[in-house]
Image (spheres, rainbow, N blue to C red):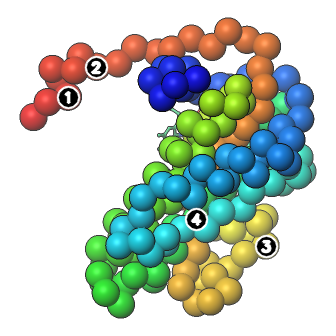
Amino acid sequence: MNFSDVVKARVSCRSYNGKQVSEEDLGKILELMQLAPTAAHYQAYRVRATTDLDLIAKIGEIAGQEERFAGATAMIVFFAVPEEGAERFGDRARDLYSIQDATLACAYAQLAATDLGISNLWVGSVDEVRVLEVCGLSKDGKDGLGLWPVAVSLFGYTDEKLARCGRKKLEDLKV
Ligand SMILES: Cc1cc2nc3c(=O)[nH]c(=O)nc-3n(C[C@H](O)[C@H](O)[C@H](O)COP(=O)(O)O)c2cc1C
Protein backbone atom coordinates (compact mmCIF):
# COMPACT_ATOMS: atom_id res chain seq x y z
CA MET A 1 0.00 0.00 0.00
CA ASN A 2 1.19 3.52 -0.60
CA PHE A 3 1.12 6.01 2.27
CA SER A 4 -2.30 7.53 1.61
CA ASP A 5 -3.84 4.05 1.19
CA VAL A 6 -2.43 3.05 4.58
CA VAL A 7 -3.74 6.18 6.26
CA LYS A 8 -7.17 5.66 4.69
CA ALA A 9 -7.24 1.96 5.61
CA ARG A 10 -6.54 2.54 9.33
CA VAL A 11 -9.83 2.31 11.16
CA SER A 12 -10.35 1.40 14.81
CA CYS A 13 -11.19 -2.27 15.21
CA ARG A 14 -13.29 -3.38 18.19
CA SER A 15 -14.00 -6.93 17.08
CA TYR A 16 -11.12 -9.43 16.67
CA ASN A 17 -11.32 -13.04 15.52
CA GLY A 18 -8.47 -14.61 17.51
CA LYS A 19 -6.12 -15.17 14.55
CA GLN A 20 -2.55 -14.90 15.80
CA VAL A 21 -0.38 -11.91 14.90
CA SER A 22 3.03 -13.42 14.23
CA GLU A 23 6.10 -12.45 16.21
CA GLU A 24 7.68 -11.60 12.86
CA ASP A 25 4.95 -9.06 12.06
CA LEU A 26 5.08 -7.65 15.58
CA GLY A 27 8.82 -7.19 15.03
CA LYS A 28 8.18 -5.34 11.75
CA ILE A 29 5.69 -3.06 13.52
CA LEU A 30 8.29 -2.24 16.18
CA GLU A 31 10.96 -1.52 13.58
CA LEU A 32 8.80 1.10 11.86
CA MET A 33 7.57 2.47 15.19
CA GLN A 34 11.17 3.25 16.06
CA LEU A 35 11.45 5.61 13.09
CA ALA A 36 8.95 8.05 14.62
CA PRO A 37 10.40 11.46 15.46
CA THR A 38 11.07 12.24 19.12
CA ALA A 39 11.84 15.49 20.91
CA ALA A 40 15.56 16.27 20.58
CA HIS A 41 15.96 12.58 19.71
CA TYR A 42 15.71 11.58 23.37
CA GLN A 43 13.33 8.72 22.46
CA ALA A 44 11.65 9.26 25.81
CA TYR A 45 9.36 6.25 25.55
CA ARG A 46 9.45 2.54 26.16
CA VAL A 47 7.19 -0.26 25.03
CA ARG A 48 5.96 -3.60 26.27
CA ALA A 49 5.14 -5.57 23.14
CA THR A 50 3.42 -8.85 23.81
CA THR A 51 1.44 -11.73 22.39
CA ASP A 52 0.62 -12.96 25.90
CA LEU A 53 -3.15 -13.41 25.84
CA ASP A 54 -3.37 -13.38 29.65
CA LEU A 55 -1.72 -9.95 29.81
CA ILE A 56 -3.93 -8.68 26.99
CA ALA A 57 -7.03 -9.88 28.86
CA LYS A 58 -5.83 -8.34 32.14
CA ILE A 59 -5.38 -4.94 30.53
CA GLY A 60 -8.78 -5.32 28.86
CA GLU A 61 -10.25 -5.85 32.30
CA ILE A 62 -8.43 -2.80 33.70
CA ALA A 63 -9.78 -0.76 30.80
CA GLY A 64 -13.27 -2.16 31.39
CA GLN A 65 -13.29 -2.99 27.67
CA GLU A 66 -13.04 -6.78 27.85
CA GLU A 67 -15.25 -7.41 24.82
CA ARG A 68 -13.11 -5.11 22.65
CA PHE A 69 -9.90 -6.88 23.72
CA ALA A 70 -11.31 -10.37 23.11
CA GLY A 71 -9.66 -12.01 20.09
CA ALA A 72 -6.82 -9.46 19.85
CA THR A 73 -3.58 -11.44 19.75
CA ALA A 74 -0.90 -8.79 20.17
CA MET A 75 -0.62 -5.59 22.14
CA ILE A 76 1.86 -2.83 22.69
CA VAL A 77 1.77 -0.69 25.81
CA PHE A 78 3.49 2.67 25.29
CA PHE A 79 5.17 4.29 28.27
CA ALA A 80 6.35 7.89 28.50
CA VAL A 81 9.71 8.29 30.24
CA PRO A 82 9.19 11.68 31.91
CA GLU A 83 12.74 12.27 33.17
CA GLU A 84 14.47 11.44 29.89
CA GLY A 85 15.40 14.88 28.59
CA ALA A 86 14.17 16.63 31.76
CA GLU A 87 17.67 17.80 32.69
CA ARG A 88 17.58 19.83 29.47
CA PHE A 89 13.90 20.69 29.02
CA GLY A 90 12.49 20.48 32.56
CA ASP A 91 8.74 20.18 32.87
CA ARG A 92 8.32 20.47 29.11
CA ALA A 93 10.00 17.07 28.77
CA ARG A 94 8.13 15.64 31.76
CA ASP A 95 4.66 16.83 30.88
CA LEU A 96 4.75 17.13 27.12
CA TYR A 97 7.66 15.73 25.10
CA SER A 98 7.75 12.29 26.69
CA ILE A 99 4.00 11.90 26.18
CA GLN A 100 4.26 13.14 22.60
CA ASP A 101 7.14 10.71 21.93
CA ALA A 102 5.09 7.76 23.19
CA THR A 103 1.99 8.95 21.34
CA LEU A 104 3.80 9.30 18.04
CA ALA A 105 5.33 5.85 18.49
CA CYS A 106 1.82 4.45 18.93
CA ALA A 107 0.56 6.22 15.82
CA TYR A 108 3.47 4.90 13.75
CA ALA A 109 2.94 1.37 15.09
CA GLN A 110 -0.71 1.46 14.11
CA LEU A 111 0.06 2.63 10.59
CA ALA A 112 2.76 -0.04 10.26
CA ALA A 113 0.25 -2.67 11.38
CA THR A 114 -2.36 -1.40 8.95
CA ASP A 115 0.15 -1.74 6.13
CA LEU A 116 0.56 -5.41 7.10
CA GLY A 117 -3.21 -5.95 7.05
CA ILE A 118 -3.35 -6.08 10.85
CA SER A 119 -6.28 -4.32 12.48
CA ASN A 120 -5.73 -2.26 15.59
CA LEU A 121 -7.31 -0.19 18.32
CA TRP A 122 -5.92 2.63 20.42
CA VAL A 123 -7.00 2.30 24.02
CA GLY A 124 -6.44 5.31 26.21
CA SER A 125 -8.93 4.66 28.95
CA VAL A 126 -6.83 2.69 31.44
CA ASP A 127 -5.79 3.00 35.07
CA GLU A 128 -2.08 3.70 34.67
CA VAL A 129 -1.08 2.41 38.11
CA ARG A 130 -2.80 -0.92 37.50
CA VAL A 131 -1.23 -1.22 34.05
CA LEU A 132 2.23 -0.79 35.60
CA GLU A 133 1.30 -3.41 38.19
CA VAL A 134 0.18 -6.11 35.74
CA CYS A 135 3.24 -5.42 33.58
CA GLY A 136 5.41 -5.95 36.66
CA LEU A 137 6.95 -2.48 36.32
CA SER A 138 7.68 0.34 38.74
CA LYS A 139 6.67 3.94 37.97
CA ASP A 140 10.34 4.88 38.56
CA GLY A 141 11.49 2.58 35.76
CA LYS A 142 14.59 0.49 36.23
CA ASP A 143 16.89 3.46 35.60
CA GLY A 144 14.92 5.96 37.72
CA LEU A 145 13.82 8.00 34.67
CA GLY A 146 10.19 7.15 35.25
CA LEU A 147 7.72 5.05 33.33
CA TRP A 148 4.14 6.09 32.73
CA PRO A 149 1.75 4.17 30.46
CA VAL A 150 0.05 6.63 28.13
CA ALA A 151 -1.37 4.45 25.39
CA VAL A 152 -2.21 0.85 24.62
CA SER A 153 -2.62 -0.51 21.12
CA LEU A 154 -4.31 -3.80 20.34
CA PHE A 155 -3.51 -5.75 17.20
CA GLY A 156 -5.28 -8.60 15.49
CA TYR A 157 -7.49 -9.65 12.65
CA THR A 158 -11.17 -9.17 12.09
CA ASP A 159 -13.93 -10.76 10.04
CA GLU A 160 -15.89 -7.54 10.03
CA LYS A 161 -15.91 -4.83 7.44
CA LEU A 162 -14.84 -1.85 9.49
CA ALA A 163 -16.65 1.40 8.91
CA ARG A 164 -14.92 4.72 9.01
CA CYS A 165 -16.61 7.27 11.25
CA GLY A 166 -17.13 10.83 10.07
CA ARG A 167 -14.89 13.76 10.73
CA LYS A 168 -15.42 17.42 11.51
CA LYS A 169 -15.36 19.60 8.46
CA LEU A 170 -11.82 20.62 7.65
CA GLU A 171 -12.95 24.25 7.86
CA ASP A 172 -14.01 23.69 11.49
CA LEU A 173 -10.53 22.45 12.40
CA LYS A 174 -8.93 25.67 11.28
CA VAL A 175 -8.39 28.39 13.87
C1 LIG B 1 -5.88 9.07 22.69
C2 LIG B 1 -6.90 8.07 22.20
C3 LIG B 1 -7.59 7.29 23.12
C4 LIG B 1 -8.52 6.35 22.68
N1 LIG B 1 -9.12 5.52 23.60
C5 LIG B 1 -9.99 4.58 23.16
C6 LIG B 1 -10.55 3.65 24.08
O1 LIG B 1 -10.24 3.64 25.28
N2 LIG B 1 -11.43 2.73 23.59
C7 LIG B 1 -11.79 2.68 22.27
O2 LIG B 1 -12.60 1.83 21.89
N3 LIG B 1 -11.25 3.54 21.37
C8 LIG B 1 -10.37 4.48 21.79
N4 LIG B 1 -9.77 5.33 20.87
C9 LIG B 1 -10.12 5.23 19.44
C10 LIG B 1 -11.01 6.39 19.00
O3 LIG B 1 -12.29 6.25 19.55
C11 LIG B 1 -11.05 6.45 17.46
O4 LIG B 1 -9.75 6.65 16.97
C12 LIG B 1 -11.95 7.55 16.96
O5 LIG B 1 -13.28 7.28 17.31
C13 LIG B 1 -11.87 7.71 15.44
O6 LIG B 1 -12.17 6.49 14.81
P1 LIG B 1 -11.14 5.78 13.82
O7 LIG B 1 -9.93 5.39 14.64
O8 LIG B 1 -11.86 4.55 13.32
O9 LIG B 1 -10.76 6.72 12.72
C14 LIG B 1 -8.81 6.24 21.30
C15 LIG B 1 -8.10 7.02 20.38
C16 LIG B 1 -7.14 7.90 20.82
C17 LIG B 1 -6.32 8.68 19.79
* Amino acid type shown at disc 4: Phe
Q: Is mark 2 within 8 Å of ligand 1?
A: no
- Of labels 4 and 1, earlier in sequence is 4
Q: Residues within 10 Å of mark 1 (few under 14, many from 20)?
A: few
Q: Is residue 66 visible?
A: no
> Would you identify the image quadrant in which residue 109 lies?
top right
The numbered dot on residue 173 is 1
Residues at marks 2 and 4, CA–CA distance in whole angstroms = 30 Å
- Of labels 2 and 3, earlier in sequence is 3
Towards the viewer: 8 or 137: 8
Which residue, given by chain and number where applicable, does mark 3 sit on? 136
Local secondary structure at mark 4: strand
Whether tag 2 and tag 1 are in contact, CB under 8 A, the answer is yes
- Of labels 2 and 1, earlier in sequence is 2
Q: Is mark 3 within 8 Å of ligand 1?
A: no
- Which mark is nearer the camera, 3 or 4? 4
Towards the viewer: 119 or 138: 119
Local secondary structure at mark 1: helix
Whether tag 4 and tag 1 are in contact, CB under 8 A, the answer is no
Q: Is mark 4 within 8 Å of ligand 1?
A: no
Which residue, given by chain and number where applicable, does mark 4 sit on? 79
Q: Residues within 10 Å of mark 2 (few under 14, many from 20)?
A: few
Which residue, given by chain and number where applicable, does mark 2 sit on? 168
Q: Residues within 10 Å of mark 3 (few under 14, many from 20)?
A: few
Return the x and y of residue 54 as percentages of the image width and height: 90, 51
